[in-house]
Amino acid sequence: MKIRYLFQLVVGAFCLLWISKEVGLPAYAYLSYSDRYIELSGKCANAMDESWFVEQVGNSELDKTRVFNILCQPGFHRSM
């Protein structure tokens, strides 16, 4: 009888830990970082759009600016 109770306790604890890992931690990460993620996604999308337009011109000086603009987004590299 004690072995069955111990088994149920271990399985129950494992299930609770698994559910918290699969539901609790992602929910916490979403609530903690969702605003920052949306902001950085918008900045990245704008940089990529500008990069495409500059690439269409074919100017080598503008191309250097394009690469710099993508790599040096303010705050982007520090947040990841």
Image: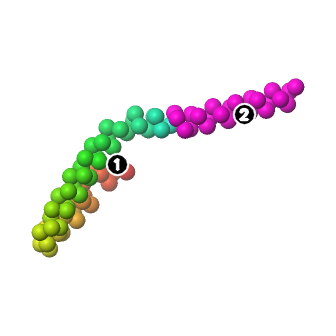
Side of 14 relative to 2 (left or right): left
* In this view, 29 is above or below 40: above
* In this view, 78 is above or below 53: above
Give, as a three-letter code, the residue at label 1: Ser
Q: Position of residue 14 (x, y in %)?
A: 67, 35
Q: Would you say residue 42 is visible in this rendering? A: yes
Pointer 1 local density, CA inside 10 Å: few below 14, some 14–19, many at least 20: few
Of residues 32 and 7, the one drawn nearer to the viewer in this rendering: 7
Residue 31 falls in image quadrant: top left
Side of 11 relative to 39 (left or right): right
Queried whether the magenta region covers residue 57, the answer comes back as no
* In this view, 50 is above or below 8: below
Residue located 55% across and 38% down the image = 22
Give, as a three-letter code, the residue at label 2: Val
Queried whether the magenta region covers residue 10, the answer comes back as yes
Side of 25 relative to 71 (left or right): right
Q: Position of residue 13 (x, y in %)?
A: 68, 31
Q: Earlier in the sequence, mark 1 or mark 2?
A: 2
Residue located 50% across and 37% down the image = 25
Nearest to viewer (mark 1 / mark 2): 2
Q: Give the residue at mark 1.
A: 79
Q: Give the residue at mark 2.
A: 11
Q: Position of residue 29 (x, y in %)?
A: 44, 38
Which structural element holds mark 1? helix
Residue located 62% across and 35% down the image = 17
First to last magenta residue range: 1-24
